[in-house]
Image: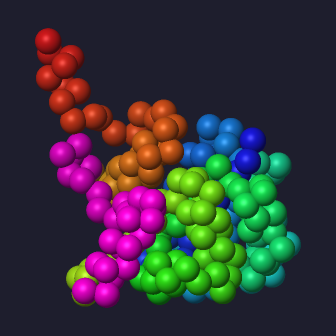
Amino acid sequence: MNPIVVAITGASGACYGLRLIELLLASRRPVALILSDAGRKVLNFERGLDWPEETALLQTKAREHFGARELLRIYGCGDLFASVASGSSAPEAVVILPCSMGTLGRIAQGLSGNLIERVADVALKERRPLILAPRETPLHSIHLENMLRLSRAGAIIAPAMPAFYQRPATLEDLTDFMAGKILDLLRIPHSLFPRWGATEQEAE
């Protein structure tokens, strides 16, 4: 089974990416994690981690964090020789969560200056799911035009916008809602939040 690539870039919201990886590993899906340098720094700051820059050490830290071994592989952001960079071994899907507007803009222009941008380009050209979760507000016209361009190219734009109809009580509830929406897009079953109308159906 080809891996699902999860990339974490320098936008705020690293908790979403970490939770998605945890859930994918729990469902026995192989995961290839790519961190941009800014993404690693924001992740460390927001989550109080101390993940290093060097890829081998980072893989050890990440595997310890998730309690995973063979299912989790770390690729350096500059490793354009990684298997996931080729259409001949394209990943099952690519999720960039959170996705900075800089990363989104470069993908929209077809640029492949690093591995995150390259795997996104591979997903588009090989017609594999590409899910981008921007976390920015407000948005200006260039942001919106880039998102429209990517949507027309086949990407799914899934902004990090948790809902409140499930009456979240904790930060974890909000994080689970977003992770669950991504799992829905990947067609992976979960029970992270109640579905809209579920209470009415139970009453009937």
The C terminus lies in quadrant: top left
Measured from the top left, where is residue 103 in percent x and y? 51, 81
Residue appearing at x 48%, y 33% in the figure: 189
Residue appearing at x 18%, y 46% in the figure: 165
Measured from the top left, where is residue 64 in percent x and y? 75, 58
Magenta segment: 141-168
Measured from the top left, where is residue 173 in percent x and y? 35, 50
Q: Horizontally, is 51 left or right of 69 in the view? A: left
Residue appearing at x 50%, y 83% in the figure: 109
Is residue 43 or residue 84 the one in the foreground? Answer: 84
Q: Quadrant of residue 126?
A: bottom right
Measured from the top left, where is residue 69 in percent x and y? 81, 51
Is residue 158 or residue 47 the one in the foreground? Answer: 158
57 inside magenta stretch: no
155 inside magenta stretch: yes
Q: Is residue 14 visible?
A: yes
Is residue 146 or residue 114 the one in the foreground? Answer: 146
Q: Is residue 49 visible?
A: no
- When the figure is inspected, residue 42 is found, relative to residue 187, above or below; the finding is below
